Amino acid sequence: MSEIVLSTSKSGRLYRGQTSVDFVGRRRIWLLASLVVIVAGLSSLGFRGLNLGIDFKGGSSWQVLAKGITVSQATAAVTSAGLNDPNVFLLGGQTLTVQANLSSLSLADQLTETNKVVTALATLAHRSPNQVSTSSVGPTWGGQVTNRALEALIAFFVAVVAYIAMRFEPKMALAAFIAMLHDLLVTIGVYSLFGFQITPDTVIAILTILGYSLYDTVVVFDRVRDNTSGVMKTGAMTYSEMINLSMNQTLARSINTSLVAILPVLSILVVGAELLGATTLQNYGLALFVGLMSGAYSSIFIASPILAWTKEREPRYRELSLRLETRAARQAVTPAMAARMTDDKNSVGSPSSAAAAATVVVAKPRKRKKR
Amino acid sequence: MATTATSRRGLAVSLVLTLVISFGSLIGAMSAGWGPKLGLDLAGGLSVVFKPAHATSAANMNEVVNIISNRVNGLGVSGATVHLQGGNVAVSVPGVSDARAVLADVGQTAQLLFRPVLCEVTVPQKVLQPLKNYNGNPCSAKTAFTLANLAVTPDSNSINGFTMANLGPDLSLTNFPTTAPASDNPYETVALPVLGQPGRRYILGPAQLSGQAVKSAVAQQDQAGAWLVNYTLTSAGSPQWDQVATKNFHMLVAIELDGVVQSAPVISATATSPSSFGGQGSISGSFTQSSAQTLAIAMQFGSLPVRLLPLSTETVSPTLGHSALVAGLGAGLAGLILVLLYTILYYRALGLVIWLGLGVTGALLWAIISALGRTSLAPSFDLAGVTGLIVSIGITVDSYIVYFERLKDEARAGRTVRTSVDRGFKSAWRTVLAADMVSLLAAVLLYLIAVGSVRGFAFFLGLSTLMDVAITWYFTRPIVILLGRRSGVQSNSMMSMAAGMGVSNDE
């Protein structure tokens, strides 16, 4: 799919909405690609689990701006301040972060230990203790955060499916739901695979991704609905061909929108988190980046093929497909075309027929009128 | 849409109004010196979430919020919020430099103390170092609240049932520093503010009794309908109170909670000589229902009605917050520039419409966020909010993309630019509405259900989505349609509107 965007000759067609990618016919490839990523992610989830941040499992963390201090220097400093097994890392080359679990200590001792580490870090970074940020989270807080996030997720799914089912149709709601589920699984899988830390910000980001992916899907489905009452009425194309047409018509928009959405996120990730070292931004940026890519992919390659697949099972569209197929066979004059038809008999919309559909849209109804 | 002539005027009016309102409100907000209320992670500060140690009633939790609010507000910082979040109490104090000291104040166990009032002072003009460890009585002889100076006389003709000299504040002590709640030592002389009376402080002597002597207190109305607080003392507290009352007969005793004087009644003002209270007493005065209830609650729950455990505490240093703000702004700007470059390359003249549109949206958003920052309606503007806005750049620009791609469709179908802009908008408008509706749905749900910074994110995402709908209708529609109607005589240059629509005038 990448060559559509990159090659110059095809980009002109993309710009004019004249591409002819067979989104529906090649659905096995798209689904398989997603399945590979999801299975890899899920198996990693099974074996390694998720790298939960202190907000979920409880613990304490310290942050200070410390240019030129190495992780080993910092580890030595906080260990001598009494921390057992601290997790020390540098973000953006300057924000020193130390994480540790103090829950075995009493509340008063936790406070004392927190202040000791603050002093140690302040001395190390040549800063006043006021410039050390601290955070401590009880083990039960994470459970609450997770529960609220799950509640929000379920409410979101229910509301969105209901909205699409009412505004569009139930099968579109199903396809959109599967696409969202896809994005959720891909994002969580990637987090597990690469061991990225899950924070409450990650949860926010995932919810945004689902909204975004859905937003994208809705725009495509809006065009599908348009075409259903438009070109579909002529009976000149199957439902799958119509979806392919809609997809190709909105492809430039989908790619533009995804680019416009991903550019700021990429900038959050690169400029905000890497160059300037804002950790919250990094947490958002990472999830959003993975998720937006997945969301852009799923609204093009998952939602629409699934919609086509479920709609083609409806009797009226199955009959339409059969009728058009036999008519096409009858009209097939050249041996080459006949051969191609038999080759592609089983796939609903082959690349060639989709290409034909894209150029035929305007021409075919006129032919029918003449008859 | 009506005839071209009328709708043309309508479009122009809509366009001009949008430009005037958005840039006017931005200039207004900036010249008024308004700015967004920065959140904890950008301004630095403290945030704590407390959990009750055991299940308790909603009324008790509201009481906890009240007590903690009083404590936090007593610190003299602005923009602090205390609210219930699920079953927990969330405290956020942005903009403090020494967050850990504040944490100690907020988290301390409350203590209710009865102290003799030595004299009254006003509030110092400048901020002074809080008073630490002071013993003795600084009040001058004339203004000291002594038995002789106060001259309390029972008088049944007076409304209150007694008369008293009005001594006024001791002006020589105006710069006497206020005692910080953390250094409020029962054994020392302190200077404390009075609840609900800004500008008034009392110099108080060492505590003579603690809240443990009070068994219960309740706000009630007397036969005349005036509010008063009736209290009962414990069996151990009853004789202790009688001692205090005798010692301070016809003088003022302050009831102090967490470093704030809740009330300072005159002891036995209507009696001519001290006598035993018999374990019960009543405080009357110019109470309203709520001030009587506040005092009753303070006396009964001197300490919090339920013990609190910190679930999560976070302190952010102002330097780290500042660097995060710079990073957020940097990321936003860089992302915006990338998007702007892309749109101008892809859509040419139409790209300029996106630039202007983003300018309008940005101006209006800044004005709204600044205005909301002056109220308590909106969550403070934190890093999550910044991210919400950065993400909304995508959603905002997408509305233009949807429209412009429709324009290209129409142009490809052989229509002129003039007719394309009208037809294109109609179909694009429906798409934008459907898609923004989904985004808004997500924002509202997140805002209602989620906790913490998620709400800020949802709020600003929802706000900018609403803006997108408004801007698409009141700005994008008129400007593109008006441009489209003028484009009959347009050039065929690379920057023309037709170039952005993928049609050339040669065709």
Image (cartoon, coloured by chain):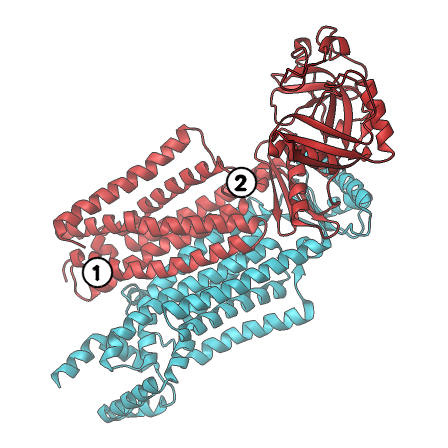
Q: Which residue corresponds to the image point at 61% horizontal and 72% vertical from the top-left? A: A42
Q: Residue furthest top?
A: B142
Instruction: Report which quarter residue B90 is drawn in.
Output: top right
Density class for disc 2 (Cα within 10 Å; few <14, some 14-19, many ≥20) is many
- The amino acid type found where label 1 is placed reads Arg
* Residue occupied by mark 2: B325
Instruction: Report which quarter residue B439 is drawn in.
Output: bottom left
Instruction: Report which quarter residue B46 is drawn in.
Output: top right
- The amino acid type found where label 2 is placed reads Leu
Does B23 sit left or right of B186 as displayed?
left
Letter of the chain in cyan: A
**Residue A273 percent across, percent down from the top left:** 56, 48
Letter of the chain in red: B
Position of residue A210 relative to residue B110, above or below, is: below
* Residue occupied by mark 1: B423
**Residue B199 percent across, percent down from the top left:** 61, 20
